Amino acid sequence: MTRFIPLLFVFLWSTGFIGAKFGLPYAEPYTFLFVRMTLTCAILLVVLLVLKKEWPKSHRLGGHVAISGILIHVGYLGGVFTAIKMGLPSGLTALIAGFQPLLTAFIAKPVLGENVRPVQWAGLVLGIIGTVLVLSEKIDLNNTALFEGFPLSAVFIAFGAVVCITISSVYQKKYCTTMPLMSGTFIQYFAACLIYGLLASGLETMEIQWTGEFIFALFWLIFVPSFGAISLLMWMIKQGEASKVASMFYLVPAVTALEAFFLFGETLGLSALIGMAVVSVGVALAVRN
């Protein structure tokens, strides 16, 4: 059964983009993320107390866990939301995020001593090619308007988000493999919640339209990506090599494109279908033992 966990992770993680599309029209990004993190922490704390789960055995480990959480939940999520808020098209943002597995592979060897073999490098490169094909229908490189309407800094912020999730994966593999999964996840969310509270109160109005769509999106993001996908990601990082785990992110744009096709009627043409096949082959090569 454990062999299906990476595929389940990809599906759960990809729904986060769909949930964001439903909810962001009704709240500013940092406010949305602050409310999401606050409710997630409250629910998770109740579960921890009721089940009497163990906590990290040292303050040092707890600090490492908090840092890894800030990197992924603030550095990555906050960076992506900020870039999109600044006008960067979501398709271009996803394309930039597609460099994460390659970046992870580059730093996994010197930091973790992981050996990425030639066949795995081939898989990582195929993953990038497939991701470009999947997103090619959403990005018109011949249209100069693509590069209008957003500052160059938005591009750097998007790349910064990719760097943050890459560092988080490697950092957690190096320093946090002994953390208790449930309490460690709470610490990560709590650290992110504090920072989002400061960002939202300092930079946004914190006004929310409590519509049915927003409430649905909020609770979907709490129970599916926040609890489900993140728990699976932490488990995979603990069990496997960081570079192999990162390669699973190549599948996210393809799965998201399928979900958007059925939910929002977005286009899904031949190049996207070919891209999905290429990505699948790339991931299969990247995770080979």
Image: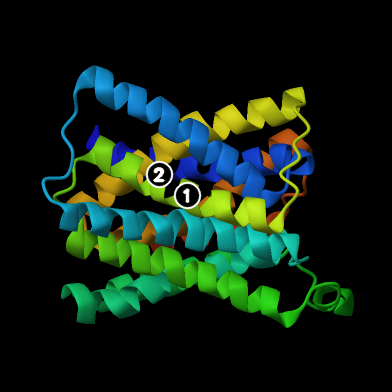
Front residue of 171/52: it is 52
Residue 131 figure quarter: bottom right
Residue at x 49%, y 57% (from the top left corner): 74
Q: Can you identify the residue that label 1 sits on?
A: 194
Amino acid beneath label 1: Leu
Q: Can you identify the residue that label 2 sits on?
A: 190
Amino acid beneath label 2: Phe
Q: CA distance from mark 1 to mark 2?
A: 6 Å
Q: Do the numbered discs 1 and 2 sit on residues whose CB atoms are within 8 Å? A: yes
Q: Position of residue 258 (x, y in %)?
A: 63, 43
Front residue of 285/61: it is 61
Q: In the drawing, what numbered circle is on residue 129?
A: none
Residue 36 horizontal side relative to residue 100, left or right: right
Tell me if residue 7 can be seen: no
Q: Is residue 96 above or below residue 267?
A: below
**Image quadrant where one finds the N terminus:** top left
